[in-house]
């Protein structure tokens, strides 16, 4: 399934390696293998695979991860662009 | 649950306002309930792993977008089989499709299932919205008096619930320790037998053909609901404009218009999901465009002689093709919402680029089509 790759270079995911305590929870919760644990620290090895679900940031006990999380859904973004409150799906 | 204080709130997963908790168990009067289990907190509804015909009919209906928002089970604590106070507690959503998938994957097991009130939405989407979330989970633990039912303090959550749940806060406010299990329910038995069996593959969300296929009907039905009324209107207008009688116009150019519109829609809602890994381009709007070309090219070559290979005929076919491609691209782009790997930043970027082109395409295409009808009438 190497063909299932989305637009590169757009995601907002950031990892602050200074804060990382190496617990590995981000590696566990990420559904796309974006993080790898290397010598007791998380490393972003596949940033472009990130879908901005926010699981890593929400579960990081050290608040070392930041991402503008959200569902990638057309209606939700239209509502957001028009400044409307509305459901995504 | 008490106020959990200031914390990093992701924009899409706002905390649910907490209310006063009255202890409560789900009703025994639900089709899925087969009995009850006496516990210290009362009669807990008992379920099993069997999926009956009426369950399957329900699954089929929601896959076709029928009654999807009413396909729920009551939130709260359920007993699968005969769990005791050391049995694992699995947490899930109150979408019945999710609930059924979970219980069906655990035949012969005795465990507790804690169903969160996700308003009938599946775990992953609900986690994104925050209803499968920290506050609801803490509330549900309290409402269900879970700490009295089980002697341990462990919760097993699906990995895809993680976008809504902060494991650390659950521990802090309820005392329960969250473990994220495999992405897919069918990996649960292996994981329950040996947590070490959880390998990186079980942590990844793939998007195989079978999973893309089951999503097609909902995409198609929703698309038809939006496109058909407009197309029928345009068919009527075409019938007025076209040379010959109203009926001839409706059954001639009118039906051709319908064919192009439905092909564009099908390209976006059926072909794009199915051919996703093989369509060129990363943006779904581009994938949709290619799927549209695949379907519309043969349609063009078939109908060009029918409409006449003159200027008016070419303009008519050109107009319909551009409209069909724009529809294919739009509905292809819509599939980002159902896909498992598109990021919001990416979707926003492609929308800002694609929507002007898609809207312009439909507008130009429809205008071209009617100009062609008018030319034919004059000529």
Image (tube, rainbow, N blue to C red):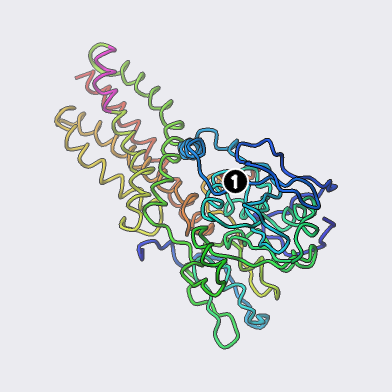
Q: Magenta stretch: dominant SS?
A: helix
Residue B219 spot, x, y in % from top left: 44, 41
Location of the N terminus of chain A (image quadrant):
bottom left
Query: Of residues B290 and B86, which is closer to you in this image?
Result: B86
Query: Of residues B79 and B18, which is closer to you in this image?
Result: B79
Q: From the viewer's perspective, is A49 left or right of B361?
A: right
Identify the residue at horizontal 39%, vertical 61% (top origin): A4
Helix, strand or loop at label 1? It is loop
Query: Of residues B313 and B113, which is closer to you in this image?
Result: B113
In magenta, the rendered stretch is B246-256
Residue matched to label 1 = B121
CA neighbours of label 1 inside 10 A, class few (<14), some (14 to 19), many (20+): many
Location of the C terminus of chain A (image quadrant):
top right
Identify the residue at horizontal 81%, vertical 61% (top origin): B4
The stretch drawn in magenta includes residue B252: yes
Q: Is residue B92 above or below residue B173?
A: above
The part of the image, by quadrant, that contains residue A23 is bottom right
Identify the residue at horizontal 60%, vertical 83% (top origin): A41
Q: From the viewer's perspective, is B242 left or right of A1?
A: left
């Amino acid at each position: 399934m190497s063909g299932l790759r989305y637009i590169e270079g757009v995601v907002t995911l950031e990892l602050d390696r200074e804060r990382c305590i190496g617990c590995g929870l981000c590696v566990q919760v990420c559904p796309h293998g974006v993080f790898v644990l290397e010598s007791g620290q998380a490393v972003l090895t596949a940033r472009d695979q990130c879908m901005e679900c926010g699981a890593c940031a929400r579960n990081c006990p050290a608040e070392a991860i930041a991402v503008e999380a959200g569902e990638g859904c057309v209606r939700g973004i239209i509502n957001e662009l028009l400044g409307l409150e509305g459901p995504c799906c | 649950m008490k106020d959990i204080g200031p914390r990093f709130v992701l924009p899409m997963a706002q905390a649910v306002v907490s209310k006063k908790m009255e202890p409560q168990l789900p009703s025994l009067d639900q089709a899925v309930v087969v009995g009850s289990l006496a516990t210290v907190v009362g009669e807990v509804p008992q379920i099993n792993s069997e999926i009956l015909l009426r369950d399957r009919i329900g699954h089929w209906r929601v896959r076709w977008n029928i009654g999807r928002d009413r396909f729920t089970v009551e939130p709260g604590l359920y007993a699968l089989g005969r769990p005791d106070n050391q049995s694992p507690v699995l947490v899930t959503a109150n979408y019945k499709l999710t609930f059924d998938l979970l219980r069906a994957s655990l035949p012969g097991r005795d465990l507790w299932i804690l169903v969160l009130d996700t308003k009938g939405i599946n775990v992953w989407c609900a986690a994104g919205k925050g209803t499968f979330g920290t506050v609801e989970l803490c509330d549900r633990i309290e409402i269900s008096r879970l700490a009295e039912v089980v002697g341990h303090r462990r919760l097993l959550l699906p990995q895809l619930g993680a976008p809504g749940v902060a494991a650390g806060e659950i521990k802090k406010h309820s005392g329960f320790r969250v473990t994220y299990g495999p992405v897919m329910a069918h990996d649960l038995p292996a994981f329950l037998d040996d947590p070490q069996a959880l390998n990186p593959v079980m942590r990844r969300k793939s998007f195989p053909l079978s999973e893309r296929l089951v999503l097609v009907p909902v995409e198609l039905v929703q698309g038809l609901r939006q496109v058909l009324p407009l197309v029928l209107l345009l068919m009527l207008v075409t019938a007025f404009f076209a040379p010959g009688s109203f009926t001839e116009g409706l059954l001639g150019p009118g039906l051709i218009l319908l064919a192009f519109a439905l092909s564009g829609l099908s390209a976006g809602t059926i072909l794009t999901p199915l051919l996703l890994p093989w369509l060129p381009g990363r943006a779904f709007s581009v994938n949709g465009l290619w799927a549209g070309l695949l379907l519309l090219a043969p349609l063009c070559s078939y109908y060009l002689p029918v409409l006449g290979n003159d200027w008016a005929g070419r303009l008519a076919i050109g107009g319909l093709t551009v409209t069909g491609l724009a529809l294919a691209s739009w509905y292809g782009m819509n599939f980002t919402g159902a896909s498992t790997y598109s990021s919001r930043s990416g979707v926003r970027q492609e929308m800002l680029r694609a929507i002007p082109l898609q809207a312009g395409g439909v507008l130009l295409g429809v205008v071209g089509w009617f100009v062609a009808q008018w030319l034919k009438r004059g000529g």
